[in-house]
Amino acid sequence: MKARTLKKNKVNVVTLGCSKNIFDSEVMMAQLKANNFDVEHESTSDDSEIVIINTCGFIDNAKEESINTIVQYAEAKAAGLVHKVYVTGCLSERYKDDLEKEIPEVDAYFGTRDLPRLLKTLKADYKHELVGERLLTTPNHFAYFKIAEGCDRPCSFCAIPLMRGKHVSTPIEDLVTQAKSLAAKGVKELMLIAQDLTYYGLDIYKKRALADLLEQLSDVEGIEWIRLHYAFPAGFPMDVLEVMNRKPNICNYLDMPLQHGSTSMLKAMRRGITREKTEELVNEIRAKVPGIAVRTTLIAGYPGETEEDFQEMYEFVEKMRFERLGIFTYSHEENTHAYNFEDDVPEKVKKQRADKIMALQSDISYSLNQEKVGKTFKVLFDRAEGDYFIGRTEFDSPEVDNEVLVKKENTYVRIGDYANVQITSADHFDLYGEVAE
């Protein structure tokens, strides 16, 4: 096969996995651009000399996708379609030695904290003055905003500490500087992310400082929405809710993965909380912030999960009526505490249980959405697709939550702008409306 003409110093960055990986890719791209590389994210032009794959190693499906992507580009390199292939991120942090043996065509593997070394390999300098600078891969009006790296929690099923290390908070003043820079570029919504938001500040301020951070971020001119992702329930800092109530640009939205609704399973998972305490916490959050949307994620099929445990989780979801919910099937991850136990729930049963929870959640979501019909909400428009402008309310995060669809016919809204939308109808996961005059 004849090699195509590759553009020298052109880099294609391919990102797999979660929003934290997206953030890391954006930082890497800013560094590459500052070193005079022509850099694109998931380029479709196929003329890049260099490909950098930012991998995910979280659960089996994510690992498989990452490996398939590495193999795809290794084969492209062998065919002369790219010159250099580098791999970074969680999968190569965790399995670097294995990957080097299995896929030696890759030029070099790097871990999650190896950006300076990756740049050096490309004969580029790590520019400290660029700390906090990013090339956004999201639409210009919203950005993922990582406030800490790593995790100190002992959750039995999770390999994140193996790949991301211990919890390290970014100082408040640095985050405020970053937020001002993003606002100056037109970003209106910050989605705060960390493996555990609620641990923020304990390492550098010796106290939970998420509320202090929110106070300062909410004063950044131009930031109209701040959204909280990945809060841990045990030891939740209630002062965050007071700030949320007082500051109109902090969304009434909380993403808090709870993982299960059975106390015996929560204990086995080393979550540091019972079902009863979880229910108390969610009810208190809802009482303190009326109308808040609570998003959670659960795990089906953890080792030892009985039919009774599952039924308890089902009843928990039925009772709590979460505004947003997702569920994973358990993935048996080596070097985690849970790996010591037999993965004894068959895959078919895991999937059946997850499907049953999602069917229940679909009905809950439909019922909650019907209550929105006739009401008017502030909507941020993300994109146009087919016959519709598509946006979100403050109760919805991109890609994982509900969307608001407004017919293009006789209407015009600018992507990245807010508009008040009256909801005219709703289904299980989408709202339909008209721009209010």
Image (spheres, rainbow, N blue to C red):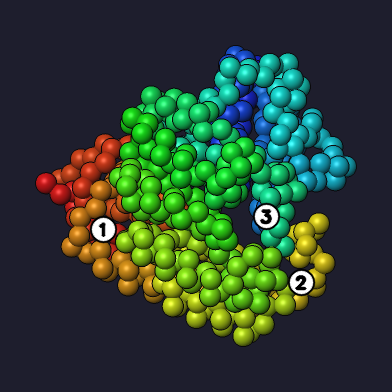
Name the outermost residue toward the bottom.
308
Q: Is residue 59 above or below residue 327?
A: above
Q: Is residue 322 above or below residue 103?
A: below
Residue 356, percent across and down? Answer: 52, 77
Position of residue 299 measured from the top left corner of the image (x, y, whole percent): 61, 67
Question: Could you tell me which residue is drawn at 38 percent across and 47 percent down?
Answer: 243
Residue 217: x, y in percent?
A: 42, 36
Is 432 positioned to the left or the right of 130 in the image? left
**How many angstroms separate mark 2 from mark 3 (CA)?**
22 Å
Q: Amino acid at mark 3?
A: Arg
Q: What residue sits right under mark 3 in the picture? A: 153
> Looking at this view, is 93 or 387 the one in front?
93
Q: CA distance from mark 3 to mark 1?
A: 40 Å
- Where disc 1 sits, the SS reads strand
The circle on residue 432 is 1
Tell which residue pokes out farthest to the left in this image.
437
Residue 371 appears anywhere in the view? yes
Q: Tag 3: Cα neighbours inside 10 Å, few (<14), some, or many (≥20)?
A: some
User: Marks 2 and 3: CB-CB under 8 Å?
Assistant: no
Q: Amino acid at mark 2?
A: Asp
Which one is nearer the viewer's eye here, 341 or 286?
A: 286
Instruction: Please state which amino acid type lies under the numbered disc 1.
Output: Tyr
Nearest-to-viewer mark from 3 and 1? 3
Q: Which residue is mark 2?
A: 343
